[in-house]
Image (cartoon, rainbow, N blue to C red):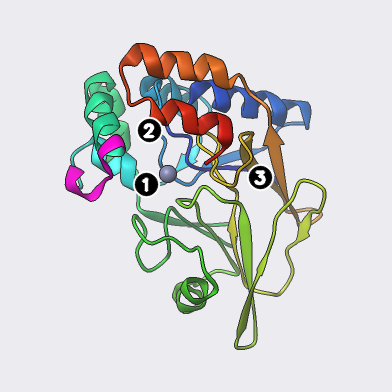
Amino acid sequence: MRYAILSDIHSNAVALMAVLEDLERRGGADELWCLGDIVGYGPDPHRCIELLRRLKCVCISGNHDLGAIEEVSLASFNPDGAQAIRWTMRQLSAEDASFLSRLPPTLEKDGFTLVHGSPRQPAWEYIISLSSAQENFPCIQTPYCLVGHTHIPIAFKKEGASVSAIPLSESIGQVLGKTPLILNPGSVGQPRDNDPRASYATYDSGSGIFRLHRVVYDVKAVQERIFNAGLPMRLATRLEHGV
Ligand code: ZN
């Protein structure tokens, strides 16, 4: 089986389309997984939900998805994020909102736990440090865990009592073996690792290789759509720097 793992699309349909085209060029995937934050920040929430639904993508919820259906308070978001969520609420069809409200906070599939933030706090915790990874490994019942939320691609591995970080890059595939791993594919729609290219990963259960991919997309077109929608300008400028 070939899996494509996407996270933090954030209503960036241009980046999502570029990722899906890149995936096709690589031979496609049998299953598409999305680790939450389909909406928020960006200008195309309806289009992103529509695309994922059409592709029968396996999705879990992120904090912005929950914000857009008023499952969490807007007070939990920074001012730009909250403004974008208020705007997003007005763009969603009843079907879109119903789709978001049915997303589970976590899923176990084919040896992976899928979660947006962390196993112990699915919507909110950032696994960004060795200590946060260390504290979450005991909460994982599957060999591997996929997380998003930080918008930064990275892996954490646990060997005995020690946890270490492994940088993920396009050039080196990660062979998934017996070592427990937490893997983050980065963000499709708002990367924050100083690389503006859309980020996603593939996993081939035949070879056991997990691989990161980066995709150039038309950032200017998205910036223009953010501007025309009246969304905060910072949400447009950060895209060209990947921050
Ligand atoms: Zn996010």
Give the residue pinned by disc 2. Answer: 39
Q: Which mark is residue 62?
A: 1
Magenta residues span: 74-80
- State the residue position of label 3: 201
Q: Quadrant of residue 42?
A: top left
Q: Amino acid at mark 1?
A: Gly
- Mark 1 and 2 residues: CB-CB less than 8 Å, in contact? no
Q: Which residue is at 19% across, 43% downward? A: 74
Return the residue nearer the eye: 221 or 120: 221
Is 77 within the magenta? yes
**Label 3 is placed on what type of residue?**
Ala
Q: Which element type, helix, strand or loop, lies under badge 3?
A: strand
| Dot placed on the residue nearer the N-terminal end, 1 or 2 | 2
Dots 1 and 3: beta carbons under 8 Å?
A: no
Q: Secondary structure at mark 2?
A: loop
* Residues packed near mark 1 inside 10 Å, few (<14), some (14 to 19) or many (20 plus): many
Query: Is residue 34 among the parts visible in the rendering?
Result: yes
Q: Quadrant holding ligand 1?
A: top left
Front residue of this view, candidates 104 and 74 = 74
The furthest residue to the bottom: 161
In-front residue for pair 97/242: 242
Q: Position of residue 135 (x, y in %)?
A: 45, 78
**Residue 217, horizontal then vertical, whole percent:** 63, 23
Q: Is residue 66 magenta?
A: no
Q: Along the polypeptide, which appears first: circle 2 or circle 3? A: 2
Evaluate whether residue 11 shows in this view. Answer: no
Q: Is mark 1 within 8 Å of ligand 1?
A: yes
Q: Main secondary structure of the magenta part?
A: helix
Left or right: where does residue 88 sit relative to residue 189? left
Category of crowding for the residue at label 2, using alpha-carbon neighbours closer than 10 angstroms: few (below 14), some (14–19), many (at least 20):
many
